[in-house]
């Protein structure tokens, strides 16, 4: 240090402004002047000494063949994985046309069944007129309403339930859990609601025109709910025939509590309206497989007596 306490002029770090300005650019200058790594340069010099080119060119026959083979493999793989759009659309159109054709056939058969059923009912009524017991016709009509074999009309209610707005999809029709928040009605939901209506005193029930009878199944298939093996789409209109207090009993029962939980927890939409006259159609009767009509009552002599 000098007497004045200042750094000597030649001391390190005394004045960076007096050094060479190009010193800070030495690394860039080195890269620009000698871009090739010394190891690569030594290898190139060795190849020249052996009479070979300094570097392997990109136009080497082996490299070109390799690139061509790789390109062909990628093209074949892409073609195999890609489904032609035209073929996919054609197949989809064929499936839709097939579904519509079969649906038309089902509708035509249903009209034929209903027409034949009306003829059978007329013939039954005519045959019962010749019987001495006039109560047979009333008993038959009661059994038809009870079993669902005949259409019915009477006071009741119409309960319309629908999916939540903007609801997603639900893979399975399992009972609701705390983690299920899709907002879609499932087959289990409809089963619980319909069972609640039966428990409240319903005498006849139908969903979107499909009568609920002893052989009716409410099932889940893919994203559709099937009733009597017919796919239904929301909203689901549940027509019910019952007494005047049917709506109040349903609201206060377990079925009504379950429906309120769906509305509050999953934004399911519902509308219950009491009606003075509700019509439900007849159920689709299953064909007889093992049963046959008895032509004459069995004689008492054919009965086997038990005992020792």
Image (cartoon, rainbow, N blue to C red):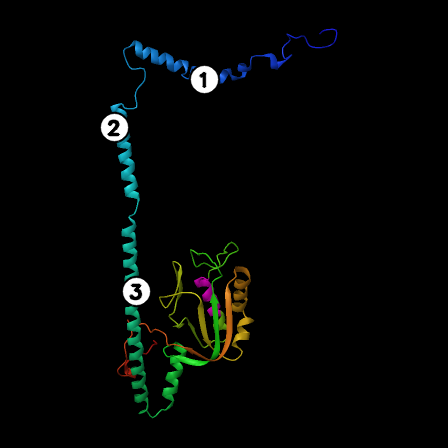
Q: Are marks 1 and 3 in contact (CB under 8 Å)?
A: no
Identify the residue position indicated by label 1 in the image: 31
- Residue 45 lies, in percent from the top left, at 34, 11
Q: Which mark is residue 65?
A: 2
* Residue 72 in view in this figure: yes
Q: Nearer the viewer, residue 120 or 128?
A: 120
| Secondary structure type for disc 2 | helix
Whether residues under marks 1 and 2 lie with C-beta atoms below 8 angstroms apart, the answer is no
Q: Quadrant of residue 21?
A: top right
Task: Judge by depth and name the residue closer to the eye, 70 or 158.
Answer: 70
Tell me the quarter of the picture where residue 37 sits: top left
Mark 1 crowd level (few <14, some 14–19, many ≥20, 10 Å Cα): few
Residues 204 and 96: in front is: 96
Residues rendered magenta in the picture: 185-195
> Which of the labelled discs sits on residue 100, or is there none?
3
Residue 46 in magenta stretch:
no
Q: Compute the Cα span from label 1 to label 3.
A: 74 Å
Could you tell me if residue 287 is visible in this image? no
Q: Residue at x 38, y 89 (%)?
A: 135
- The overriding secondary structure of the stretch rendered in magenta is helix
Give x and y (percent) for residue 193.
Answer: 48, 68
């Amino acid at each position: 240090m000098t007497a004045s306490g200042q750094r000597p002029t030649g001391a390190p770090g005394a004045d960076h402004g007096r050094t060479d300005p190009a010193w800070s650019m030495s690394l860039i200058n080195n890269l620009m002047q000698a871009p090739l790594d010394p190891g690569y340069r030594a290898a190139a010099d060795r190849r020249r000494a052996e009479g070979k080119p300094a570097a392997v060119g990109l136009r080497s026959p082996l490299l070109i063949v390799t690139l061509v083979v790789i390109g062909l493999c990628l093209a074949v793989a892409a073609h195999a994985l890609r489904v032609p759009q035209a073929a996919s659309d054609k197949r989809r159109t064929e499936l839709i046309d097939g579904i519509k054709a079969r649906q038309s056939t089902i509708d035509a058969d249903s009209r034929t069944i209903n027409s034949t059923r009306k003829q059978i009912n007329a013939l039954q009524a005519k045959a019962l007129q010749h019987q001495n017991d006039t109560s047979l016709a009333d008993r038959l009509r009661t059994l038809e309403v009870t079993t669902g074999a005949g259409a019915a009309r009477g006071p009741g209610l119409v309960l319309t339930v629908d999916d939540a707005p903007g609801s997603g999809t639900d893979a399975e029709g399992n009972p609701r859990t705390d983690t299920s928040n899709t907002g879609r009605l499932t087959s289990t939901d409809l089963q619980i609601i319909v069972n609640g209506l039966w428990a409240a005193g319903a005498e006849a029930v139908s969903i979107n025109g499909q009568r609920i009878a002893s052989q009716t199944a409410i099932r889940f298939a893919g994203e559709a709910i099937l009733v009597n093996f017919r796919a239904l789409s929301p909203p689901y209109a549940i027509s019910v025939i019952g007494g005047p207090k049917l709506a109040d009993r349903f609201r206060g029962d377990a079925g009504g509590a379950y429906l309120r939980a769906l509305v509050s927890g999953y934004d399911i939409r519902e509308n219950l309206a009491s009606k003075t006259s509700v019509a439900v159609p007849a159920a689709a009767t299953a064909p007889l497989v093992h049963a046959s009509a008895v032509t004459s009552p069995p004689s008492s002599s054919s009965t086997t007596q038990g005992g020792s």
